[in-house]
Amino acid sequence: MLAATTNPTISHFAQRLGMNFWQSLTRRGILGWSLALVFISFYAILYWSYDMDAYVYARQQQNVLAPLAKKLDAARSGNLAARHGIESQIAHVMASVALKGEGQNAYHAYLLPENRVFVDRLRNLKTQPVSAVIEGWAAHLNPLSQLIRRSDADRWFLYGFIYTALVVLMGIRFYRRWRHDKYQKMRTLSVMAVQTVLSFLLPSLLIYFNSKEFYFSYFWPLKLDYFLPSTFSDYPRAMALWAVMMSFVAVPVLTYLFGKRWYCSWVCGCGALANTMGDPFRQLSDKSERAWAVERVTVYSVLALTVVLTALIFINEFRGVDDEFGQWVFSMKRWYGFFISAGFAGVIGTGFYPLMGTRVWCRFGCPQAAILGILQVFFSKFRITTNGGQCIACGSCSANCEMGIDVRSYAMAGEDIKRASCVGCGLCMSVCPRGVLRLGNS
């Protein structure tokens, strides 16, 4: 009898606790901000751990050698012999640290006791204090990595494994949620399969065919190196032709027939993560006119930058001269990788899921999405048709649009939707209680 009276209270408390937890996670609460910090930190360590290592190690060396530095500063104001003596002491310390094996031990024996203290401290410093952590995590996947690519796991294999696992596990959750919707089930199975096979397993298994890793689901402009003269020398001819054909034949043809959804919602790895792991955050996308204006500026700016950089790399490869121009182009490519590929697509694109919704990169920065969007607006048969007379203005369609499109305004006006940013995920159609929206071709 006691259990019968207390269980409803406990059940109600558990439900309220669960609701509060979920709202805090998905409505920019403290849990949402905390999760964003975790995502951002992970991507920062993933991309920039070796740069962090160099900075941290240098700072540690400076701290150890600080007493000698102070002595050197003091000696500079004294006689020349005293200054040379301190400089020689520092040189001996650093030389001893650099030596290995028996040479190190022999040199160490001749050092003054006070120098040995500095040497021992420097030797005990960790040369990779940041990257060692992520490499340690990767080591747990060595058996799998040895099996499918004949080498130990590194940070990129770890990342690919985690990424694929999240797409599959959260994809199962999404599939179960929409198990009565054929379109959602089919595209979820598609992104799970593409991510697992084309983006994770197949690139690694190519080692068995004496080939470099090659990602069949990515091509120019997402992969700058797949559209260069060197592509035909660096990769088997079939792979190089695949990359070129996908970029300049498949993209326009498939987009003409199906809109950008064929890639953004059925193939792309970024879209796969956005539609599975990012699904709980889709309602956070900004639907304002201002956000739409910013989107058009940023995404086409990145596309323009990508086109210019590709042209520069092309010119440099044709010249075949290693001069200042070539070094400048190489530097530009590195900065592009740092700011766009790592910073925008990775750190911001995924790290901001709990703050700005799931398609931050796809909406504001992806050059592939920009090209597909242009083709979709001006050349594609795809559109979302509306039946304005049936719309009850509930707003479910707009709330669930991950690309920040105010779908309701189009539906109420009875206007077909043919926006460059629309990825054709179909959620607006799936959540509509009156069947007002339909994905189709004109």
Image (cartoon, rainbow, N blue to C red):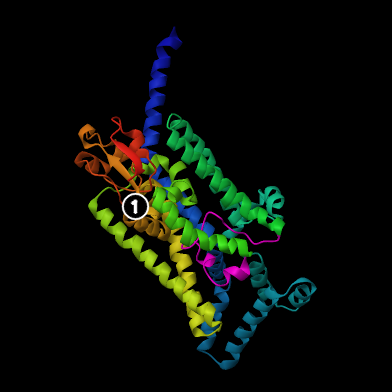
Q: Is residue 223 magenta-colored?
A: yes
Label 1 sits on what residue type?
A: Ser
Is 429 colored magenta in this rendering?
no
Write down the residue under mark 1.
421
Q: Is residue 133 visible?
A: no
Q: Quadrant of the N terminus?
A: top left
Q: Which residues are magenta?
A: 210-235
Q: Position of residue 351 (x, y in %)?
A: 43, 52
Instruction: Indicate whether 248 appears above or below 22.
Output: below
In this figure, what is the number of numbered marks?
A: 1
The answer to whether residue 66 is above or below residue 393 is: below
Q: How far from the left and from the top, in percent, is residue 51?
A: 53, 66
Please name whichever residue, 292 or 238, is drawn nearer the observer in this view of the structure. 238
Secondary structure mostly seen in magenta is loop
The structure residue drawn at horizontal position 39% and vertical position 24%, both measured from the top left corner, is: 13
Residue depicted at x 33% and y 44%: 284
| The residue positioned farthest toward the bottom in the image shown | 80
Residue 365 occupies quadrant: bottom left
Residue 55 location (% of width, % of height): 53, 68
Q: Quadrant of residue 401?
A: top left
> Quick check: 40 left or right of 432?
right
Of 117 and 293, the residue lying toward us? 293
Q: Position of residue 228 (x, y in %)?
A: 53, 70
For the point 75% across and 74% down, the residue is 104
Is residue 234 left or right of 329 when viewed as pictured? right
